[in-house]
Image (cartoon, helix red, strand yellow):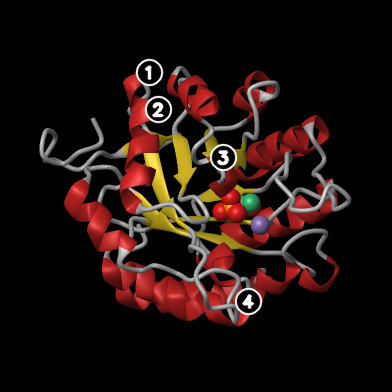
Amino acid sequence: LASRVFHPENTIVEVDGVKIGDGSVTIMAGPCSVESEEQLMTTAFAVQREGAHILRGGAFKPRTSPYSFQGMGEEGLKILRKAKEATGMPIVTEVMCQDTFDIVEEYADILQIGARNMQNFPLLKRAGRSQRPILLKRGLSATIEELLMSAEYIMSEGNHNVILCERGVRTFETYTRNTFDVSAVPVIKELSHLPIVTDPSHATGKWSMVDPLAKASVAAGADGLVIEVHHQPEVALCDGAQSLKPEKFAKLMRGIEKLVEIR
Ligand code: PEP
Ligand code: MN
């Protein structure tokens, strides 16, 4: 179902009038995690002002350590809902497990399945029975074939609105958090009709590398970008080192606009 051989024309995923995969570049931006209403609202208005289309923010966080901030849970979802009402931007947030699926599905416009869950097959099947589009992130050491097979799990249950996301994979290199595989973009364009976006924030773990790799992504043909933005990255509860301040995000947007049509 994900293969281009049997479905040559590109899939366009539409959410609240925002089209992903229509030839323009869709920007999904916002903090790693929802931390408070004030934090999310500040960042939401900032990214909207600079031209973002979709607001991101995690309420249920898959953290490496159980002692790290785990996200605000349902309270975070409610804040995301408020930010959507205030800005009009649709929201994307991660769904981590089947127990919380229904509640996340109720609040989110796009459901993210994170890298760590790319091969959580029961979760993929549940996502396949959802009416919401799914943002499926590539696993930490997953091949592109494996990513496409995970998309197949979702699609085979009936949900064909799948957006793929390259977010870096683990290699021997340790300078960056992951190694950004820009070749995933043209490879997926060749193999599949599904939209492919990239996440240079998680791919590098360093804010200074987000801008150049965002440009590389759109030059390679990506349908969109996922960018972490925080109004005070130095005090962020999660992923501050890779988060752009609003003024840096503005600079990134102006650079991208020179390369491609954002909308
Ligand atoms: C995220 O988007 O905040 C996230 C945890 O991403 P990934 O699953 O790619 O690590
Ligand atoms: Mn993050």
**Dot 3 beta carbon under 8 Å from ligand 1:** yes
Circles 4 and 3, Cβ within 8 Å, touching? The answer is no
**Residue 204 position by quadrant:** bottom right
Circles 4 and 2, Cβ within 8 Å, touching? The answer is no
Circles 1 and 2, Cβ within 8 Å, touching? The answer is yes
Q: Of discs 3 and 2, which sits in the foreground? A: 3
Q: Mark 1 points at which residue?
A: 157
Q: Where is residue 132 in the image (x, y as percent from the top left)?
A: 48, 27
**Which of these two is toward me, 111 or 141?**
141
In what element is the residue under mark 1?
Answer: loop
In what element is the residue under mark 4?
Answer: loop
Q: What number is the disc on residue 206?
A: 4
Q: What number is the disc on residue 154?
A: 2
Q: Residue at x 35, y 57 (%)?
A: 263
In what element is the residue under mark 3?
Answer: helix
Q: Of discs 3 and 1, which sits in the foreground? A: 3
Q: What number is the disc on residue 117?
A: 3
Q: Which amino acid does label 4 sit on?
A: Lys
Q: Position of residue 223 (x, y in %)?
A: 33, 55
